[in-house]
Image (cartoon, rainbow, N blue to C red):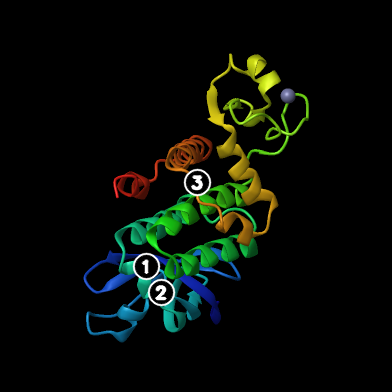
Amino acid sequence: MSRHWQTEALVLQVKSMGEDNRSVALLTRSKGLIWATLYGGPKSKMRALVSPFHCGQIYLYTDEVKQATKISDFAIHSYRPEIRENLFKTCAANLCSELVIKTHGGGEIEQLWLYVNSFLDGLCLVNEEAARHALLRFIWRFLNTMGMQPDPCECASCGTSVCSIYNTQKVFFSLAESSFYCAQCSSLGSESKGFFLHKEVVDYLRIITTEAPRVSRAIVLEEAFFYETQDFLVYILQNFSGQRFNSLDVLLKV
Ligand SMILES: [Zn+2]
């Protein structure tokens, strides 16, 4: 049995397959992550269209017996050329693709679709500094879609607000429990493996979680807190997913 079908899709990654063909990872709105083949030589106009971060309506043909899908046509509505014009933005978008591919596009499809596309659209609109903050927010939200996001609001032990402490105090994050602890309870948790984080870092994560996007978008972290947030997110992302992300290594050097 075979069929033609169409869906909204974002091109995540394109790999060579033989001399003329391409293996394409797509995040589709109807089925999440799928792989499809793009046939055609170098002169094929489809080759330029089916490029990373392009988004639009894709036309597919699936051979159910061979369990193979090929791309017939692609009507693009977002080209996002700005991503290619800046090295950091390119690396950030590559990480976004790698996250979706390596975690098999898990989680709720519609939520993932919205997070990924709004992240890529946002990269096109902002300067590099804002893009670096946008990546932090994206990683944190991505952890949520994967069910791996710790609760940044309440102490896991006593239930008081983690962020209602003085700025000079630090918040303990236990890796074993995947939980934050208030200053009083931090002494109990500090024997297990984890991190002490500045209150500003946890407060930033709380605001991304609980406030409207325009509120967290307006926050610019001091450099030290920015890097502490980044190190924390990179660590828990790799630790919880059990994956190494090649594009992270590149990204952290840019
Ligand atoms: Zn507590």
Q: Which residue is mark 1?
A: 83
Seen at 24% across and 80% down, the residue is 41
Residue type indicated by callout 1: Ile
Q: Is residue 164 above or below residue 139?
A: above
Quadrant containing ligand 1 reads top right
Q: Which one is in front, 2 or 142? A: 142
Q: Which quarter of the rendered picture does the N terminus lie within?
A: bottom right
Mark 1, Cα crowd under 10 Å, few <14 / some 14-19 / many 20+, is many
Q: Which residue is mark 3?
A: 221
Q: Earlier in the sequence, mark 1 or mark 3?
A: 1
Q: Is residue 31 above or below residue 170?
A: below
Label number found at residue 215: none
User: Residue 192: image x %, image y %?
Assistant: 58, 17
Q: Quadrant of residue 249?
A: top left
Seen at 57% across and 61% down, the residue is 115
User: Residue 12: image x %, image y %?
Assistant: 42, 64
Residue type indicated by callout 2: Arg
Ligand 1 within 8 Å of the CB at mark 3? no
Seen at 41% across and 60% down, the residue is 93
Q: Is residue 185 above or below residue 95?
A: above
Does residue 36 appear in the picture of this structure? yes
Marks 1 and 3 sit apart, C-alpha to C-alpha, by 23 Å
Instruction: Give the SS element for disc 3.
Output: loop
Q: Is residue 140 above or below residue 9?
A: above
Marks 2 and 3 sit apart, C-alpha to C-alpha, by 27 Å
Q: Which one is in front, 69 or 104? A: 104
Q: Quadrant of residue 175?
A: top right
Q: Which residue is mark 2?
A: 80
Q: Which of pointers 2 and 3 indicates the residue nearer the eye?
A: 3
